[in-house]
Image (cartoon, rainbow, N blue to C red):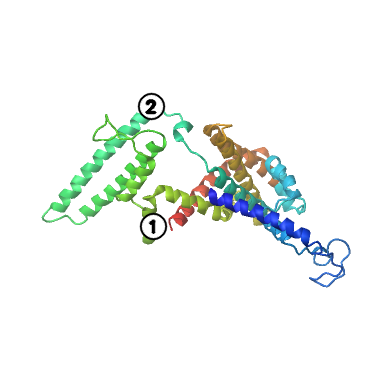
Amino acid sequence: MSSEIDAAGTLAAGGLVAAALDKQDAKAGEVQTICPNCETAIIGHYCHECGQSAHLPRSIGHIFHDIIHGVLHFDSKGWRTLPMLALRPGTLTRDYVEGKRARYVAPFSMFLFTVFVMYFTFAMVGGPNVNFADAVQLDPKSVEAAQQELVSETERLKALEAKLAAARAKPEPVPGEAAELKGQINELRTEIGIMKATLGTMGVVPRDPENPDAPQPPDWREALAKAADTDMKVDTGNPGLNAKLRKALKNPELLFYKMQQSAYKFSFLLVPLSLPFVWLLFPFRRNTHLYDHAVFTLYSLSFMSLLFVFAVLLARIGLISFPNAMAISMFVPPIHIFVQLKGAYGLSVGGALARTLLLSIFAIVVLVLFMLVVMALGAA
């Protein structure tokens, strides 16, 4: 966090220095009467030919203004766009598609702004503090069944390992027997590692098959690292990537940190991943173009990002619990999607409901694809 604070301090100090220098440079940026860009006589505040401003500042302060405006792109349009994005997303999308654009922040600019807000917020206050033990109500019977399944799978693993040792010890080994047993063992070890990690994340101590009455408290990170350190099956079709993923899984915390950084950097990939699925909702509508779907997708992703930041902030400062934050992040998006679909595409209630259901399923697919890409990028 110290690096982010230092960066913020540097930016603030730079702004103060620029303000001081601007006072010494009052003549910088005089109003032009002939446009330097196209050499047209300027009437008013802007050139009527190319649109360039008649006032061309030449001050350090303006550089910082350009930086802040370029990153945030948030002026009076933002205060008009945000309420529309939250309460009337369908109208916002339709207005922008139909050409009423001067009053709103452009979809891609809004998307970049929300990504910046998410990155800055989580850099300063930390990301979601996930505690599955508090987030879910565990059924004791289900936990006991999972513990028993873990014990039986561990015993099955030992039996397969004994079979493999016996197969290798045969004077005349059966062709393919050892390889088949090895494959079964790898798959079973992966399943056991996942089971231990799942129980660990839910605050449950996986039962030790050797000593069920005195289990050693494990950590899900340790379980995942141990599984990766053995023979966890990782098959992406690329041997080099497989090795990198297996190596990265040995240090889960570092991998998740890299995934978080990659998620910010490559968040724009959500747009091309989402577009085909949005197009599938309207495959035969002639008056709807891919551009319309892109505007819909960008505004929708912008709202989801801000909603997630809002829910996490409320949970981090203690105003709501983590389960309530999860509920907000799960139940508000379908409502927003319904309202945006109905308003943007002029759908009936039934048509919007059906497409909301489909798009909610598609969104899960897109998130899984995006996380796979982010994991591969984080490992690589």
Between discs 2 and 1, the one toward the N terminus: 2
Q: Residue at x 80, y 71 (%)?
A: 36
Q: Find the residue positioned furthest to the top.
A: 140
Q: Position of residue 126 (x, y in %)?
A: 53, 43
Q: Position of residue 283 (x, y in %)?
A: 61, 52
Nearest the viewer among 189 and 319 is 319
Question: Which mark is on residue 244?
Answer: 1
Question: Mark 2 against mark 1, which lies toward the viewer?
Answer: 1
Q: Look at label 1 and name its amino acid.
A: Lys
The C terminus is located in which quarter? bottom left
Q: From the viewer's perspective, is residue 85 above or below residue 66?
A: above
Q: From the viewer's perspective, is residue 175 above or below residue 327?
A: below
Q: Position of residue 345 (x, y in %)?
A: 69, 47
Q: Is residue 346 left or right of residue 195?
A: right
Element at badge 1?
helix
Marks 2 and 1, Cα distance to the nearest angstrom? 38 Å
Q: Look at label 2 and name its amino acid.
A: Pro
Image mark count:
2
Q: Position of residue 186 (x, y in %)?
A: 29, 49
Label 1: few (<14), some (14–19) or many (≥20) C-alpha neighbours in 10 Å? some
